Amino acid sequence: MATKDPVLEAKRYVENARTILREKAIKRDYLYTDRKYVKMAGHAAYTGVLLALDGLFGIKSKGRKDINWYRDQVARTDKKLLTNFMSAYELLHLSMSYDGNLDVSTAKSGLRHADEIIQWVEQRTATC
């Protein structure tokens, strides 16, 4: 079985999150109408962020991901990335995945942070 590119896989997860929000969560004005799908989208996008970071830091194992380990690794790498990562964690994982926050601006902001993290990883892992 061939190993997938972690950055492409991460982008796929974030795009899946956008599709879930657009097609299933249904936006009305500034709120989504279905908490279940907001939670699914938040989980998918946050998983994409972790996949990208796993590709950068060389994590090969599956299982539970420890936020403290990721925070420490990211902090050693880039302080601006740490700010993006902690925002993505709070918005995607906590607010969306756990709480099911229906606010559209929460999802947009979380997805923007996910995109920025994945792009940052892509730039650092690109081979010439």
Image (cartoon, grey):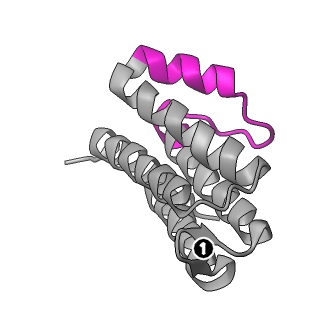
Q: Nearer the viewer, residue 30 or 70?
A: 30
Q: Is residue 68 above or below residue 91?
A: above
- How far across and how far down the image is residue 72, in percent? 56, 16
* Position in image of residue 78 (x %, y %): 36, 22
Place of residue 64 in the rendered image (x, y in percent of width and height, measured from the top left): 80, 37
Look at label 1 and name its amino acid: Leu
Name above or below for residue 111 compared with residue 59: below
Does residue 66 belong to the magenta stretch?
A: yes
Q: Specify whether 60 is left or right of 125.
A: right
Residue at the spot x=39%, y=30% of the render?
A: 81
Q: Going 60% across and 38% down the picture, which residue do you hit?
A: 89
Front one among 6 and 105: 105
Disc 1, SS: helix
Residue 15 locus on image (x, y percent): 50, 70
Residue 81 located left or right of residue 100 = left
> Does residue 78 appear in the picture of this structure?
no
Instruction: Magenta stretch: give its range.
Output: 54-76
Q: Name the dominant secondary structure of the magenta segment.
A: helix
* Residue at the spot of label 1: 21
Residue at 49%, 57% (x, y): give it: 105
